[in-house]
Structure formats: structure tokens, C-alpha cells
Amino acid sequence: MKAEIFRLRKKLSEQEKKLHSTVKRLHSTNQLKENMEKVIIDQCKCMLYCGFFCYFIVYGYLYNWGNNTMNISTRSFALP
């Protein structure tokens, strides 16, 4: 009887260790997923911002082609 109780406690302890390890792995994987999502969102924001910035630069460049200057904000740049 004591041997059976010892065997069952040992088996329970092993199962608890496996469960604890699985929970840690799941938590770590979830953190990695969240961090990757943040990186992707930040990259998309950057691409969107850069895209709008380039659009306004090109539009301003083409719009002011005849004036030979391009006004951005309060600064004026001479075209090549």
C-alpha cells in the first residue's frame, strides 16, 4: 500500500512539473507573439508615415516645377 502511494505521488509530481513547464512555454510563446505584433504594427506605421511623406514631397516637387522651388513648411529649397 505504501509503495503504491509513493508511486502515485511520484507520478503526480512528474505531471505537475510537465504542466508547469508547459505553462512557462505557453507564457513565453505568448509574449513573443505580442512582441512580434508590436514590431509589425510599428513597421506598418513607419511605412505609412514614410509613404505619406514621400507623396507630399513628390507632389510638392511636381506642383512647384515651374517655379523652380519647392516650399515645405516655412522652408524653401532650390531644385537641382
Image: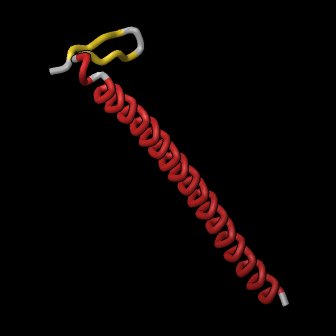
Q: Position of residue 20 (x, y in %)?
A: 67, 65
Residue 38: % across, % down:
54, 46
Q: Is residue 78 left or right of residue 60?
A: left
Number of callouts in the render? 0
**Residue 68, placed above or below residue 31:** above
Residue, far right = 1
Image position of 51 with respect to 13: above or below: above
Q: Quadrant of residue 80?
A: top left
- At a point 58% along the width and 57% down the height, the residue shown is 28
Q: Could you tell me which residue is drawn at 53 percent across and 55 percent down?
A: 32
Quadrant the N terminus occupies: bottom right
Question: Is the residue 50 above or below the residue 72 in the image?
Answer: below
Q: Is 7 or 51 nearer to us in this picture?
A: 51
Question: Colour scheme in the image?
Answer: secondary structure
Q: Residue furthest left?
A: 80
Q: Is residue 60 left or right of residue 32?
A: left
Coordinates of residue 27 in the picture (x, y in percent)? 63, 58
Identify which residue, 38 or 58, lies in the foreground. Answer: 58
Asked whether 66 or 58 is in front, the reply is 66
Q: Residue furthest front?
A: 66
Q: What residue is at 49 percent from the left and 41 percent from the top?
A: 45
Q: Quadrant of residue 65?
A: top left
Q: Nearer the viewer, residue 68 or 54?
A: 68
Q: Quadrant of residue 26?
A: bottom right
- Height in image: 58 above or below 13? above
Residue lying at 52% horizontally and 46% vertically, measured from the top left: 41
